[in-house]
Image: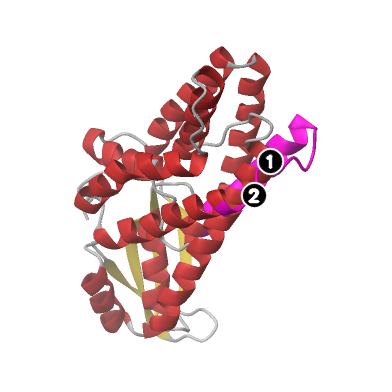
Amino acid sequence: MFLFEAKRILIVIFGSLLGAISLNFFLIGANVYASGFTGAAQLISSVFNDFLGIGISTGVLLFLLNIPVAILGWIKVGKGFTIYSAISVVFTTLFLEILPVIHLSEDIILNAVFGGVIAGVGVGITLKLGASTGGMDIVAMVLSRMKDRPIGTYFLLLNAIIIALAGVLYEPENALYTMVTLYVTTRVIDAIHTRHEKITAMVITRKADELHRAIHNKMVRGITILPAKGAYTNEDKNMLYLVITRYELYDLEKIISEIDPNAFTNIVQTTGIFGFFRRDN
């Protein structure tokens, strides 16, 4: 248990480091903006510096923007999820303050692409472990549950605002290069971790009773148990069929590895469901 949590924290911190590298080494110097609250913090920092003559770093603004969101996440999303998200935000802020803002390249396209790739890897590995980078991730989850709309709708809305403001306040080209960064980041996240809010897990196991009890002890999800038989071994087994959110995937993987390491699990995207699906856990 301790090793699992230590690994989780270390990878969340590493994801934060990658996010800071993406910003300080590529995006900030090129006036290209990241997605979500990070991009919003970048834009506000640029406006304060360029139009008001007030120097406020991106890291400090990112931390301040996430304070009310962390409170919202604690109440609406879950304590464990919010704690790991807070760790991500704190270390991203720390690394942004420690690492210098440098220009590795004068080519804005290279900055946009490499910044997007590195940011996508950082966010992807964080999401894969059931945490988030905070900010818009938490806001989008809460709004999605309240309005019953796809979580991507709210990501798109905030990012569209960032792109539009970047184009109005600075050069229109900055908005276009920001779109390149957002596209690359999204594609990398998709390659590392599913972006779909709901996913379906089909688990073939010899320990169905132990497994479903362990899952119910950790999460409130309905499970259908079906008889299954191996075509090659002719051995009787069971299949557990359940729909979960992408943020519960890490917990499910952990439970399966502890109860039945030999279980076979297939994870597929769920584009829609009919019927009751608990949204407030």
Q: Residue at x 34, y 70 (%)?
A: 240
Residue 119 is covered by the magenta coloring: yes
Residue lying farthest right?
A: 106
In this rendering, the label closer to the viewer, 1 or 2? 1
Residue type beneath disc 2: Ile
139 to 261, vertically: above or below: above
Q: Position of residue 271 (x, y in %)?
A: 41, 43
Q: Residues within 10 Å of mark 1 (few under 14, many from 20)?
A: many
User: Vertically, is 126 above or below 257?
Assistant: above
Q: Which residue is mark 1?
A: 26
Looking at the rendering, which quadrant does residue 78 occupy?
Answer: bottom left
Q: Quadrant of the C terminus?
A: bottom left
Q: Which residues are magenta?
A: 98-125
User: Mark 1 and mark 2: span between their CA atoms?
Assistant: 10 Å
Q: Main secondary structure of the magenta part?
A: helix
Give the answer, above or below, for where 123 lies relative to 208: above
Q: Earlier in the sequence, mark 1 or mark 2?
A: 1
| Amino acid residing under circle 1 | Phe
| Image quadrant where one finds the N terminus | bottom left
- Residue under the point 32% across and 39% down: 139
Q: Position of residue 98 (x, y in %)?
A: 57, 54
Residue 108 x/y as whole percent:
75, 30
Q: In the displayed structure, does residue 172 sit left or right of residue 44?
A: right
The reply to whether residue 112 is in sight is: yes
Question: For mark 2, what is the residue?
Answer: 118
Image quadrant where residue 274 sits: top left
Seen in the picture, residue 202 relative to 33 is either above or below; the reply is below
> Which residue appears at 36% of the width and 36% of the height?
150
Q: Is residue 206 left or right of residue 52?
A: left
Does residue 46 belong to the magenta stretch?
no
Label 2 environment density (alpha carbons within 10 Å; few <14, some 14–19, many ≥20):
many
